[in-house]
Image (cartoon, coloured by chain):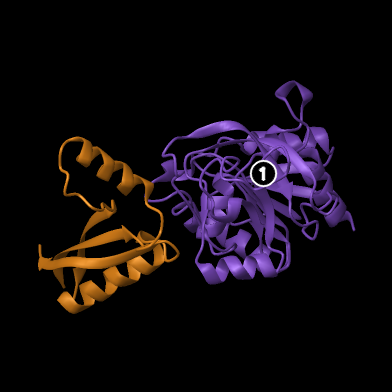
Chain colours: A purple, B orange
Amino acid sequence: MKVGVVSFPGSNCDEDALLAIVERLHESAVLLWHKDHDLQGADVVILPGGFSYGDYLRSGAIARFSPIMQEVVAHARRGGPVIGFCNGFQIACEAGLLPGALLRNVSLQFRSMPVTLRVETSQTVFTNAATAGARLTMPIAHGDGRFTADADTLTRLESEGQVVFRYVNAAGEPTEAANPNGSMRNIAGVCNPGGTVVGMMPHPERALEPLLGSTDGLVLFESLLASVKA
Amino acid sequence: MTRFVVSVHIVPRQGLLDPQGKAVADSLRTLGFAGVRDVHVGRHVVLELDAADAASAERAVREMCSHLLANPVTEDFELAGVRPA
């Protein structure tokens, strides 16, 4: 498997995503510069976290028009896997790869903390090695993470199994207290209808080392590897 | 071609939670502006562009709003003015 990690000006989790692939999965990964038009043969594209283009206008709004994004969108339309973490999720929404939008946290505060997620579906390239209902702990670090969509879109996402993760409490319930940003229906991550494009606000690439408090992110990368090798 | 200045208001869609607007409304009430019922905070964008006439300047800016300046999922926009530069 070869993974391409896009570096936008202002990305700050691209190296973490690269290391996740190289050091934890022992697979190859390359950084893709935002001005390039070439995915360099990558089977998978990761849109990393950060503050691409300074989050000017809206988070992800400008990054979406990068030359590399035209290739990423074409790759996704061919059924190629694309994963967006945090700012990468915002970019994927702005690019129309995923439904909805990520707005300012309801608290108006930047939230950097571990959260508990419930896996809502294992029918995606990124969760097939996980069990629906499983709970994962990993960090969030964002100011604009409030998932928002219109009522029809929310209904469709739920009925079609496109909600991938929800923020839950220790008992696994999606309560208001467990929701760190005011996301509609506690949604932390969604996918496209085919389960090949996934976006999530939490950072699985920061949950791979016991020293950092959790290794729960690993199952997502193992899922990815299993999907691509299958 | 004539140079035009076009301004556009971009506001959070009605009915969507607007925590920024709410925080400002709360502050205004704390200051004693007791009559404040609701506040919405958006963006005011001023563009200078060359176009054949005012109508095509306006049309171009509407297109810019749909493509980039406003998020079709969460925001509405309205042109606030078109005038020769």
Q: Nearer the viewer, residue A59 or B4?
A: A59
Instruction: Classify the position of the C terminus of chain A by image quarter.
Output: bottom right
In front of the other: B4 or A51: A51
Residue corresponding to mark 1: A168
Q: Residue furthest left?
A: B84
What is the residue that sits farthest to the right in this orientation?
A230
Report whether B18 appears left or right of A122: left
**SS at badge 1:** strand
The residue shown at (63%, 41%) is: A202
Residue A172's spot in the image, x, y percent? 72, 44
**Residue A42 is at least partly visible in this image:** no
Q: Quadrant of residue A135?
A: top right
Determine the image quadrant of residue A13: top right
Across and down, in percent, residue B31 comes to 17, 35
- Asked if residue B4 shows in the view, the reply is yes
- Compared to residue A217, the image places residue A188 above or below, namely below
What chain does mark 1 sit on? A
Q: Position of residue A37 (x, y in %)?
A: 59, 57
Q: Nearer the viewer, residue A40 or A164?
A: A164
What number of labels is visible? Answer: 1
Dot 1 alpha-carbon crowd within 10 angstroms: few under 14, some 14 to 19, many 20 or more = many
Residue at point 56%, 62% (across, down): A70
Q: Three-letter amino acid code at disc 1?
A: Val
Write the residue at 56% across / 64% down: A99
In the image, B12 versus B84, the foreground residue is: B12
Q: Does residue B69 lie above or below A6 as drawn?
A: below
In the rendered view, does A190 fall on the left or right side of A53?
right
In this rendering, position of residue B54 left or right of residue A129: left
Residue A148, percent from left and from top: 50, 57
Q: Residue furthest front?
A: B34
